[in-house]
Image: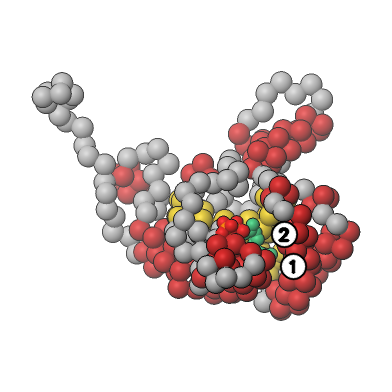
Amino acid sequence: MTDNNLPDNIEPNATSHTLDEANKIPKHIAIIMDGNGRWAQARGKKRTRGHKAGVERAREIVETSGKLGVESLTLFAFSSENWQRPQEEVSYLMELFVIALNREVKMLNKHSVKLNFLGDTSAFNNKLQESIAKAEHLTKDNDKLRLNIAANYGGRWDIVNSVNSLLQENAGISSISEELLDSRLATSHLPPLDLLIRTGGEVRISNFLIWQAAYAELYFCDTLWPDFDANELQKAVDAYAKRQRRYGKTGEQVQADGDE
Ligand code: FPP
C-alpha cells in the first residue's frame, strides 16, 4: 500500500500510442462556427459583414473536408436560440442562407455533395424553405460528402423530438432504449460524431448535438470562424489523430483490442 492507503499495483493509463496518425481521419466532423460578429467588429464593420465572410469560410471548409475524405460534415448555422438576436440580424441571416444556398447548390452537386438540413426548418420563411427543399432534392443521390446544415436546431429539441416520434409510433410504449432514441434523432442516418470543433474561443457546446457528442472528441480554438481556413481544419484533424478514444476502457485494453 502507498502512503495514501491506495493499493500500489494499479497500472497507469497509457498516455501515448503508436498508430499511424495519418490514417485517422474523422468520419464525422461537426463545427460550431463562432466568432463572425467579433471578426467584423474588430474591423469596424457591422456584425452582418462577419456572417458574409463566414459563408465564404464554410465553402472552403466543405471543400477541404471532401479532399480529406471526411464522410459527414455538420455545420451549426442557426440554433433554436438564435431567434433571440436582433431582428435585423436574423433577417439578414435568412436572406444570406437563401443567397448562399442558391449560389452554391450547383457546385455542391457537381462535387457529389449530399446536402441535408437538420432542425425544425418549418419555422423558416417560404423562400428559404423552398431553397432548402430544392437543394436537398437536387443532391439526394450524391455519395461523396454528406453536408448537414443544422438550422433552427437544438440538441434538446432533437432528443425530445425523437422521444415524441417514438411515442406517436408506439402507443403504450413503456421504455425507450438508447438505440431506439438514437434511431429517431436528426443524425440517425449519419456516422457517429467523431470530432466536434468550436471556433471563437468559447468553451461550451451551446445545445448542439448534445446526445451525439457523448463520445466525440472536442476541439476548441480561439480562431474566429471567418479566419478558420483549411490549415486550421488540418490542425484540428491532426489533434484528433493524436487522441486515444477509450470509451471507458483503459489505454492498454484499447491497444490490445486494436480499436484505434
Ligand atoms: C456565429 O457567429 C455564427 C452564427 C450565429 C451563424 C451564422 C453562420 C454563418 C453565416 C457561417 C456559415 C453559414 C452556412 C450557411 C453554412 P457569432 O455571430 O455568434 O459571432 P460572435 O460570437 O463573435 O458574436
Quadrant for the N terminus, please: top left
What is the image's colouring?
A: secondary structure
Q: Residue at x 60, y 47 (%)?
A: 208
Residue at the location (74% across, 67% down)?
Answer: 96
The vertical placement of 92 against 248, above or below, is below
Q: Is mark 1 within 8 Å of ligand 1?
A: yes
Query: Who's the residue at 29% across and 55% down the image?
Result: 17
Residue 252 vs 114, above or below: the answer is above
The residue at which mark 1 appears reads as: 96
| Residue 47 in picture, x, y percent from top left | 63, 64
Label 1: how many Cα within 10 Å (few below 14, some 14–19, many 20+): some
Q: Which residue is mark 2?
A: 89
Residue 237 versus residue 103: which sits nearer the camera? 103
- Tell me the quadrant of ligand 1: bottom right
Q: Amino acid at mark 1?
A: Leu
Quadrant in the picture for residue 76: bottom right
- For image coordinates 15% across by 23% down, the residue present is 4
Residue 181 versus residue 45: which sits nearer the camera? 45
Looking at mark 2, is its residue's CB closer than 8 Å to ligand 1? Answer: yes
Q: Nearer the viewer, residue 2 or 20?
A: 2
Residue 85 locus on image (x, y percent): 70, 51
Cα separation between marks 2 and 1: 10 Å
Above or below, 14 relative to 159: below
- Placement of 149 over or under 232, stated as above or below: above
Mark 1 element type? helix
Checking the image for residue 147, the label placed there is none
